[in-house]
Amino acid sequence: MVAGHLRKQNGIYQMILCYKDTNNKRCSKSISTGLPIKGNKTKAEALLEQTRKEFIPPIWNKDTYVHIYISQWLKFAPLEAIEFSQYKLHIAQWIVPYFKEQVLTIEQLSVQDLEQYFLFLRKADNPQMASTRQLISTSHHILLMAFSHAVNCGWIEQNPLTSINPETGKGEILFADFILKWLTVVKYQVQDTTYAGYRTNVVKRIEPYFREKGYTLNELSDNPEYIQEYYTYELEKRHVKPNTVIRRHANIHSSLEYAVQLKLLKDNPANRVSRPEENTYEAKYYSVEEMMQLFKAAHGDPLEICIFLAAFYGMRRSEALGVRWSSIDLVNKTITVNHVVTDVYIDGHCQRVMKDRTKSKSSTRTLPLVPQFEQALKYVYQKQHYEQYVCGDSYCKEYLDYVNKNETGELLKPGYVSDHFQLILKKNGLRKIRFHDLRHSCASLLYSAGEDLKAIQKWLGHSTISTTANIYTHFDYNKKIKTANAMSETLPTNILPGIEAH
């Protein structure tokens, strides 16, 4: 307990607490009682006595070594004499010797470090203690109190002892907490759009389910069926599509793989569950005739260029919005896809992503600039210069290099592209498809024109030909029909009994 006395100042009792820091230098701290001097001396003295018992001097920080902190903290801990004597012996015999060898600071101490310490206690030969459980419980209680003070002082955000079972000394980390921790780590390993998808899956669906169940990492390891039950819940209760569950399985698997990497788990329990079968996606396509009707309907519309880029060049929406004047080479007649624009939603807030990086390395590609599109681009370029002249200072100068802008120079929003595209279709009586289906239509028309899957892969910027083949499986089937028809011409007409030659 620190020393202290009362002092009168401005008509109020002040408590002056005195202590020595780690360098044996005298320090003091003034705390107001809030009590007027007149008639409150007894109350002020009682408050001083209580404060002296509870006050722990701010003489350490997050970089203080654990063994030094624990031994010094005990001197000021609010303990009774018998308890103090017992804890002093325990700290000297077990905590200080162990952590003195580990050389860990307050900030560095983790759940894994504590698990190793309690494992050391379980293996220790200790005839002086009633049981190993009592030994672990005593250490847990001392460390819990000491690190609660560290949290209160702001040296650490969370007390690592709260994640340790005081009876077993093993970490009891909730899977719901851990997958959120994994999310913060993976944020810097994937693209922004990918992270946004991960976060939506985890925060809105995975974490709330497992939070309610209260499963720990160790429980999932021992009972992988708990993960399987989550997939069944999503499929049968919430009626989500199998592909959605597969994406969430990928998040759960990756987070648990990270737990294995940290040696929190011996193996990944997600390897011992069954994913649902993928539901086959059937892409929609426009025929040549429908495409011509669309081009006619979009003529003069703000989406005209976007639609052409998606339908003719097979660009993704983000790639079409990312086309810049600097990526168009009028000398060599080329257009380069090397920039994307998209919106991601994190915690309900929209964030615009603009970067010189497409979905994959193969997505960066250079395509020929056809004369019809070149003429359309020249018209748009002149139109934008005129709009800039008319708007003057009101014209947005931030996106001057971008092709797809509105009349005030603002970049077209991804959501606007998808929504306005549907209005064009409805207004002109065209069959309803998604904007992304224009990319599929491009591939279909290329195949109809005699291009093989390898050429289509390069045109669309798929990373592998298997991606192209998986999406456009009907191409291969159509080729098989052609092969079958060609083969059938070589067969005699009377190959089967009962069929006469004509």
Image: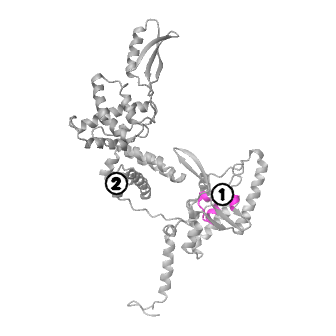
In the displayed structure image, the side of residue 19 where residue 437 appears, left or right = right
87 shown above or below 166: above
The Cα atoms of the two marked residues, 2 and 1, are separated by: 48 Å
Could one spot residue 449 in this view of the protein?
yes
Q: For mark 2, what is the residue?
A: 269
78 shown above or below 419: above
**Residue 412 rendering spot, x and y as whole percentages:** 65, 52
- Secondary structure of the residue carrying tag 2 is helix
Nearer to the camera, 263 or 192: 263
Q: For mark 1, what is the residue?
A: 303
**Residue 290 rendering spot, x and y as whole percentages:** 61, 67
Quadrant location of residue 99? Answer: top left
Nearer to the camera, 104 or 52: 104
In the displayed structure image, the side of residue 80 where residue 463 appears, left or right = right
**Residue 173 rendering spot, x and y as whole percentages:** 36, 43
8 shown above or below 72: above
Residue at 63%, 56% (x, y): give it.
321
Residue at the extreme front: 24
Residue at 60%, 65% (x, y): give it.
314
Q: Earlier in the sequence, mark 2 or mark 1?
A: 2
Identified by mark 1, the residue type is: Leu
Q: Which color scheme did the rendering employ for the protein? A: one colour
State which quarter of the image contains the N terminus.
top left
Residue at 58%, 72% (x, y): give it.
455
Residue 75, magenta (yes or no): no
Residue at the extreme top: 39
Taken as a whole, is the magenta stretch helix, strand or loop? helix
